[in-house]
């Protein structure tokens, strides 16, 4: 009976960690422009950070072959020919961490040509770390009880 | 939950006992395997449009790591086509044993190689070249062909399935993780095996061949080295072999004491973390180093790769358990407690593969219609546009896999620590730290 009570407690705590709404600090949206150089098989810069609500302009410049840039979660993309640039503007209205990746076959390592866009705080990572901490806490308590 | 004997069901039992259903699957697999070799060698060099890359490293890998290993253990080994040509040559037959067997050398594998160190090395060799292997069709074709010929060569020299048991780079980790699977092949009554004359399950009979995996089923206590080939079901004259449904990770209740298996756990754990960083991370320099084989950057990458697996991960693990009060030698504690990393490693691979597979699965649809990348359109799907699948569930699924793996690992650590009479806390904390790193790499 006590076991099931503890289990219920941990499950409820887990649900709170996973889904409880977090306060969002009010930050005035800005216009952000990034020039991204694309080459086989990397973007430079490969990590972008913006605030939620920012209007983001990506200027993709390909330095060797045709490359694309597709943003996971936003489902938007652009393509740039060699030596040319292409521009994409969007509002970063989804918070979290998103991979952006080449969506035009550009060579052997094409599936792994990946960058990272972080909009605001990567809350899901922190929630996941919280869940892991909770899991370990539960395991340690049960270890102590058995000892 | 107690065990449920699946072979009590006459349909399942007959399907497993008959050679024909397995042969039908074997033939499909062998044709697919040979086609993958040919596609790799003569198809387009563009990996994402070549059957060998798309079907081996995306489709097969997804089925293997997300379904086959977690739920069926060595189920893949039961239908793997790689040992077949060699085994058929060795036996001189495709189905039941022939009257006269061919005279191959039939040597016993030397004792020093009767462990999984060679499998550890073969996996690491492929892992070090994986950026090229996973993306270059002709390299994939060559490696697949090399594995087929190695299996044939070893079947001509050594008895049974020496390739599967001691060299296959995939078989090593399938064996390790098969301990977590909810399925097992075991004997029903030990006394029957003790009094059984001739031990046909191991030595063979007219009904079938002696265990190809060099295992005496009467002594089976874990899944690691049983290839689920079902020969013993066919040869047992006492109907004493059963296939059971059981709780997950039942084999891990009694931890291993072998260093080759312990290091296998570290190799798999470390490889999943390195792949998550190098292949799925945003760092171009790491990808360049991993892909440009033979350059100084690649050698540095190789040294870092091996250091993480053989020094850093086991080193911190050892430091954690060093001070534990125990009458057992450190080596035995290390091997036993490393058992806790088996479910964690499996879940690391599940989380890594989810990202890789869901992002690239749409290539399968196009490759179905144009498997060689020659402009065919067999099913009208050759021009299917690349699109990531199920993005919205990817991160929650990865968290579920990794945190679930951590809980599973902690439970396993408690049982292993209980067996060797030490505290499980250092292992649980170690598992938490590596899980946190993996979460950071993937999310």
Image (cartoon, rainbow, N blue to C red):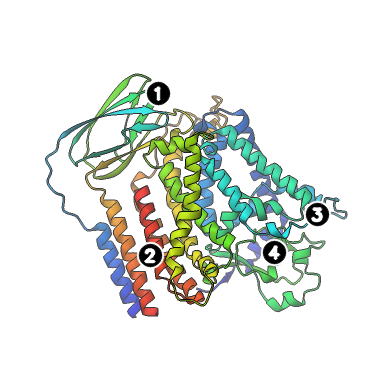
**Camera-side mark, 1 or 2:** 2
Residue B155 point in image, percent of width and height: 75, 50
Q: Which residue bears the numbered disc 4? A: B215
Q: Which residue bears the numbered disc 3? A: B106
Mark earlier in primary sequence (3, 4):
3
Which secondary structure lies at badge 4?
A: loop
Kindly tell me whether residue B179 is visible in this rendering: yes
**Dot 1 and dot 3 residues touching (CB under 8 Å):** no
Give the letter of the chain under mark 4. Answer: B
Give the letter of the chain under mark 2. Answer: B
Which secondary structure lies at badge 3?
A: loop
**Dot 1 and dot 2 residues touching (CB under 8 Å):** no
Q: Which residue bears the numbered disc 2? A: B429
Relative side of B371 to B108, left or right: left
Distance between mark 4 and mark 2 Cα atoms: 36 Å
Relative side of B271 to B161, left or right: left
Which secondary structure lies at badge 2?
A: helix
Residue A11 point in image, percent of width and height: 31, 67
Give the letter of the chain under mark 3. Answer: B
**Camera-side mark, 2 or 3:** 2
Q: Which residue bears the numbered disc 1? A: A66
Label 3 neighbour load within 10 Å: few <14, some 14-19, many 20+: some
Give the letter of the chain under mark 1. Answer: A
Which secondary structure lies at badge 1?
A: loop
Q: Residue visible at 49% across and 71% down?
A: B416
Distance between mark 3 and mark 4 Cα atoms: 16 Å
Which of B370/A44 is in front? A44
Distance between mark 2 and mark 3 Cα atoms: 48 Å
**Dot 3 and dot 4 residues touching (CB under 8 Å):** no
Report whether mark 2 lies on the same chain as mark 3: yes
Label 1 neighbour load within 10 Å: few <14, some 14-19, many 20+: many
């Amino acid at each position: 009976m006590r076991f099931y009570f503890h289990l219920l407690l941990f499950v409820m705590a887990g649900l709170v960690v996973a889904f409880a709404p977090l306060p969002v600090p009010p930050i005035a949206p800005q216009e952000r422009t990034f020039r991204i150089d694309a080459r086989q098989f990397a973007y430079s810069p490969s990590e972008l950070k913006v605030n939620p609500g920012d209007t983001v302009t990506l200027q993709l410049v390909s330095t060797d072959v045709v490359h694309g840039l597709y943003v996971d979660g936003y489902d938007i993309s652009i393509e740039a020919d060699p030596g040319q640039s292409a521009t994409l503007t969007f509002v970063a209205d989804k918070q979290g961490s998103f991979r952006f990746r080449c969506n035009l076959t550009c060579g052997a390592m094409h599936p792994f040509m990946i960058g990272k866009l972080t909009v605001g705080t990567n809350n899901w990572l922190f929630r996941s770390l919280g869940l892991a901490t909770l899991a370990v806490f539960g395991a340690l308590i049960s270890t102590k009880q058995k000892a | 939950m107690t065990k449920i004997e699946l072979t009590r069901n006459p349909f399942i039992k007959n399907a497993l006992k008959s050679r024909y259903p397995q042969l039908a699957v074997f033939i499909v697999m062998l044709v697919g395997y040979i086609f993958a070799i040919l596609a790799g060698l003569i198809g387009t060099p563009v990996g994402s449009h070549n059957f060998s890359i798309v079907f081996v490293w995306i489709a097969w890998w997804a089925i293997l790591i997300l379904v086959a290993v977690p739920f069926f253990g060595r189920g893949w080994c039961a239908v793997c086509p790689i040992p077949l040509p060699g085994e058929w040559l060795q036996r001189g037959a495709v189905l039941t044993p022939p009257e006269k067997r061919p005279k191959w050398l039939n040597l016993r594998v030397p004792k020093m190689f009767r462990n999984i160190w060679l499998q550890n090395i073969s996996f690491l060799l492929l892992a070090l070249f994986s950026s090229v292997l996973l993306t270059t069709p002709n390299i994939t074709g060559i490696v697949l062909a090399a594995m087929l010929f190695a299996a044939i060569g070893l079947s001509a020299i050594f008895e049974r399935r020496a390739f599967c048991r001691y060299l296959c780079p995939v078989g090593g980790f399938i064996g390790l993780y098969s301990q977590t699977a909810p399925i097992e092949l075991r004997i029903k009554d030990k006394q029957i095996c003790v009094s059984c004359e001739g031990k046909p399950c191991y030595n063979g009979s007219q009904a079938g061949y002696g265990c190809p995996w060099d295992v005496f089923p009467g002594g089976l206590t874990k899944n690691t080295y049983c290839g689920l080939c079902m020969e013993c079901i066919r040869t047992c004259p006492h109907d004493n072999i059963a296939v059971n449904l059981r709780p997950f990770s039942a084999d891990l209740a009694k931890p291993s004491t072998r260093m080759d298996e312990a290091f296998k756990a570290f190799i798999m754990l470390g490889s999943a973390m390195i792949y998550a960083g190098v292949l799925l991370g945003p760092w171009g320099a790491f990808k360049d180093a991993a892909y440009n084989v033979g350059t100084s950057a690649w050698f540095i990458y190789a040294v870092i790769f091996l250091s993480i697996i053989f020094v850093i991960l086991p080193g911190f693990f050892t430091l954690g358990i060093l001070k534990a009060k125990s009458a057992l030698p450190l080596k035995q504690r290390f091997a036993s407690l490393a058992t806790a990393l088996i479910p964690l490693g499996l879940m690391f691979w599940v989380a890594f593969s989810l990202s890789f597979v869901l992002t690239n699965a749409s290539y399968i649809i196009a490759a179905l219609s144009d498997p060689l990348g020659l402009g065919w359109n067999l099913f009208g799907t050759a021009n299917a546009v690349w699109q990531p699948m199920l993005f919205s569930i990817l991160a929650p699924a990865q968290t579920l896999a990794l945190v679930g793996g951590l809980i599973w690992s902690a439970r396993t650590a408690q049982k292993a620590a209980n067996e060797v009479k030490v505290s499980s806390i250092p292992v649980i904390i170690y598992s938490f730290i590596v899980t946190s790193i993996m979460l950071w790499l993937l999310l």
